[in-house]
Image (cartoon, rainbow, N blue to C red):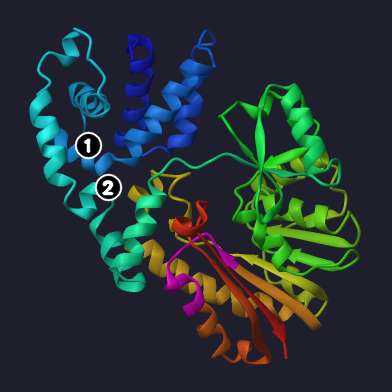
Amino acid sequence: MRLHRNLVLAIIKVLDGVFNQDLYADKTIEKILKQDKRWGSRDRGFIAETSYEIVRWKRLYLEIAEVKKPFNYQNLWRIFSVWAILKGIILPSWKEFEETPRRRIKGKFDKLSKIRKFRESIPDWIDDLASKEMGEKKWEKEIAELNKMAPVILRTNTLKVIPSELQKILHNEDVLTDQVKGHPDALRLRERSNLFKKDSFQKGLYEIQDASSQLVAPFLNIEPGMKICDICAGAGGKSLHLSALSKNKGQIIAMDIYKHKLAQLKKRAKRNGAFNIETKLIENNKSIKRLKGKIDRLLIDAPCSGLGVLRRNPDSKWKLQPDFLNNIKKTQLEILKQYSTLIKPNGKMVYATCSILPSENEYQIKNFLDSKEGEKFKLEEEKKISPFISGFDGFYMARLSLK
């Protein structure tokens, strides 16, 4: 592989934003890619994938490069050179690479690869917590899988098209896909592609949604005509899926505390042709009281650590802190207690997270069932999706019904 200076400079800018300014990797990469319209898909792919890979292996690369924050210009080049040497790329005779210790880089890599926290590039506290909760062997497998690049999975919008038809349409747009076993609406891209500019996307024929995430909405066991509430809707990926499953019948109330996310959901719903979704901003307890005892199905896609989706958000493991995790666990239980009152007799709810930690998942359900608010409920079924076993994101979901 031949390195091009303008592309490497773009990666250096990404690293500066993520490592020095604590910016989000996806937003930083998106901004950098807009700076030069001459870049083709291969150039853009190189910038994005290399940046994500260096962010993913940040701890390992910093240790090998022997640099610490704040990173000056030369430090960032040194980090990049570690990536390049370990990839077997011949470094050009640029001044930034003049003092690169090639042999020492490989030697340090071999030594550090024997220590999990460096080999898997994970903060000490996450490594300790996850191995304690899950057991050493299971955590070892899961974190290794979570350090792989995530596949691109589409969810067919069945309000407009069926998967086999969508495959043909995408094929005509030079996008090749495969169906995913056990996920009836999912298609997996054979090669990464910029889908947002495709006519098929603009027409709302699909959404980008991991295969594990696609299991949550069906887990609610909904029927067309039901009154459904998604109380942590965000930008609405699962609300849109619920609309498709309900065949645009009944009512889906998508609620969130963030107005800008609900605004995004409205745009997506229009593109998808999902007309039975009503957005509602959570401002106070009044919105809850009005719906008390009126909901057939409740989805709590709870805020969580996101440890099950590290492949997509490799920088999140560096932003996550113990205090946040402790606070979010309290929030999860509060949400369960508060919103479970919305369910009508014979109704059901699903609690879901994109975490693999038992303390955010089955332990939370036990805590809820042991509480005053939860004593009216029984656990019908729970599902744990292992990244190592499935090859997709880590998820947990539990379906509960009123006794």
Q: Position of residue 351 (x, y in %)?
A: 61, 71
Mark 2, secondary structure of its residue: loop
Viewed as shown, does residue 302 lie left or right of 326? right
According to the picture, the residue beneath numbered tag 2 turns out to be 121
Upstream in sequence: badge 2 or badge 1: 1
Left or right: 230 as drawn, with respect to 390: right
Query: Residue at 81% of width from left, 74% of height from top?
Result: 296
Nearest the eye: 161 or 284: 161
Task: Give the residue type at disc 2.
Answer: Ser
Callouts 2 and 1 close, C-beta under 8 Å? yes
Instruction: Please state if 12 lies on the left or on the right of 115 as rendered.
Output: right
Q: Quadrant of residue 25?
A: top left
Q: Position of residue 349 (x, y in %)?
A: 70, 74
Q: The C terminus appears in which quarter of the rendering?
A: bottom right
Tell me the residue that label 1 is attached to.
61
The segment highlighted magenta reads 352-363
Residue 253 higher or lower than 92, as above or below: below
Query: Which element carries disc 1, helix, strand or loop?
Result: helix
Structural crowding at the residue carrying mark 2, measured as other residues with C-alpha within 10 Å and reported as few (<14), some (14–19) or many (≥20): many
Q: How far apart are the two marked residues, 2 and 1, measured between alpha carbons?
A: 9 Å
